[in-house]
Image (cartoon, helix red, strand yellow):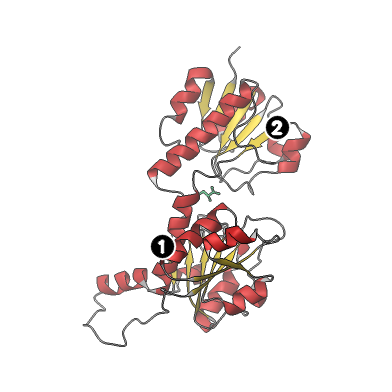
């Protein structure tokens, strides 16, 4: 009998056709859809979006489920313990999105510091009356001290870009990298987040969302950032307390923020919407076409492999 796979959202590229070659494919708008509910008892695989909450209650409706392939590297939308308890394998899409996400982090850093989106709005609103030396000044990007919170694949890819901008890169994470790697990437280990915040002109967040990182940047932490500094987040919105961030953008110490992710997507805190010094993008970190196609085909390949009884390509451990 053909296995059933539920695909929870649009898959760029040919991943859907690949799945259809081997399985009965049911599509629907998320795991909350009636299509999922109808197929759940026979579903063997789910190709999940990061907007799907995969928890024990959902798993209970799908007793034949063998694999959840998340079309994302982040898996904070999935209860990993519940999956393990029910012998459901979870896979994600690491590596393929590293460069695209680092590109966007860098774009947001420059955009926020150099007020690019704000300048665009000023022109369109007819607010530009001519060049003057003091108009729309911002922090200097070239040569700035950049602090990276998390130094995994994406953090390291940002560090590589920073070299071209003559930046001094510091990073903090639980374990220090080996010295030769630090040398190649031109990055210095900073043992605490407080020190990283106090010494960086810009801080960019590249750690996963976990109970330990939820609201890591709260009012207390934001107050430790340098006056006139910039905060960038392309990881997960809930790492920052958005109300506290709005305060820090309004009253200091921050000059600007570049945000691709939000606590309650697609809703954005109204006080952030009102801040001209916040550059906001709609969770498009991995949204270059080849990257999204590669994410979709990685998820599909994981499902094919697991349902054929082979090891997953990119299991979450
Ligand atoms: C991820 O993969 O976790 C990203 O947020 C998707 O863009």
> In the image, what residue occupies the spot 58% across and 22% down?
4
Q: Is residue 136 above or below residue 211?
A: below
Left or right of 310? Residue 127 is left
Query: Circle 1 — which element?
Result: helix
> In the image, what residue occupies the spot 26% across and 73% down?
123
Residue 84: mark: none
Residue designated by label 1:
107
> In the image, what residue occupies the spot 61% across and 79% down?
198
Q: Is residue 239 above or below residue 43?
A: below
Q: Is residue 209 above or below residue 229?
A: above
Disc number lying in front (1 or 2): 1
Question: How many discs mark residues in the rendered view?
Answer: 2
Query: Circle 2 — which element?
Result: loop
| Residue at far front of view | 180
| Residue at far left of view | 130
> Looking at the image, which is closer to me, 24 or 36?
24
Quarter of the figure with the C terminus = top right
Residue 189 position by quadrant = bottom right
Residue designated by label 2:
88
> Looking at the image, which is closer to me, 234 or 192?
192
The answer, for residue 285, to whether it is visible in the render is: no
> In the image, what residue occupies the spot 55% across and 76% down?
200
Mark 2 CB lies closer than 8 A to ligand 1? no
- The first of marks 1 and 2 along the sequence is 2
Q: CA distance from mark 1 to mark 2?
A: 38 Å
Number of residues whose C-alpha sits closer than 10 Å to that of mark 2, classed few (under 14), some (14–19) or many (20 or more): many
Left or right of 222? Residue 18 is left
> Looking at the image, which is closer to me, 270 or 228?
228
Number of residues whose C-alpha sits closer than 10 Å to that of mark 1, classed few (under 14), some (14–19) or many (20 or more): some
Residue 211 position by quadrant = bottom right
Quarter of the figure with the N terminus = top right
x, y percent for residue 80 = 71, 42
């Amino acid at each position: 009998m053909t296995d059933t796979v539920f695909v929870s959202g649009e898959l760029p590229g040919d991943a859907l056709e690949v799945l259809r070659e081997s399985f009965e494919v049911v599509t629907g708008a998320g795991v909350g859809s009636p299509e999922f509910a109808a197929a759940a008892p026979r579903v063997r695989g789910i190709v999940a979006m990061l907007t799907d909450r995969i928890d024990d209650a959902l798993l209970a409706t799908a007793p034949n489920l063998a694999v959840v392939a998340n079309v994302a590297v982040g898996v904070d939308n999935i209860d990993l313990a519940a999956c393990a308890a029910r012998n459901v394998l979870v896979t994600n899409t690491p590596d393929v999105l590293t460069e695209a996400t680092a590109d966007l982090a860098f774009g947001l850093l420059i955009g926020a510091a150099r007020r690019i989106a704000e300048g665009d709005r000023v022109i369109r609103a007819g607010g530009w009356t001519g060049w003057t030396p003091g108009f729309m000044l911002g922090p200097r990007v070239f040569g700035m001290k950049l602090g990276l919170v998390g130094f995994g694949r994406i953090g390291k890819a940002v560090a590589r870009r920073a070299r071209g901008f003559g930046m001094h890169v510091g990073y903090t994470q639980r374990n220090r990298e080996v010295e030769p790697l630090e040398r190649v990437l031109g990055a210095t280990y900073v043992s605490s987040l407080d020190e990283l915040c106090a010494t960086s002109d810009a801080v960019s967040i590249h750690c996963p969302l976990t109970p330990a990182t939820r609201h890591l940047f709260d009012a207390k932490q934001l107050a430790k950032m340098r006056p006139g500094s910039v905060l960038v987040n392309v990881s997960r919105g809930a790492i920052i307390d958005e109300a506290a961030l709005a305060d820090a953008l309004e009253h200091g110490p921050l000059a600007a923020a570049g945000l691709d992710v939000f606590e309650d997507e697609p809703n954005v805190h109204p006080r952030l919407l009102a801040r001209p010094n916040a550059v906001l993008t709609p969770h498009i970190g991995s949204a270059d076409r080849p990257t999204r196609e590669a994410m979709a085909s990685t998820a599909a390949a994981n499902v094919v492999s697991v349902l054929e009884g082979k090891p997953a390509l990119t299991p979450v451990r």
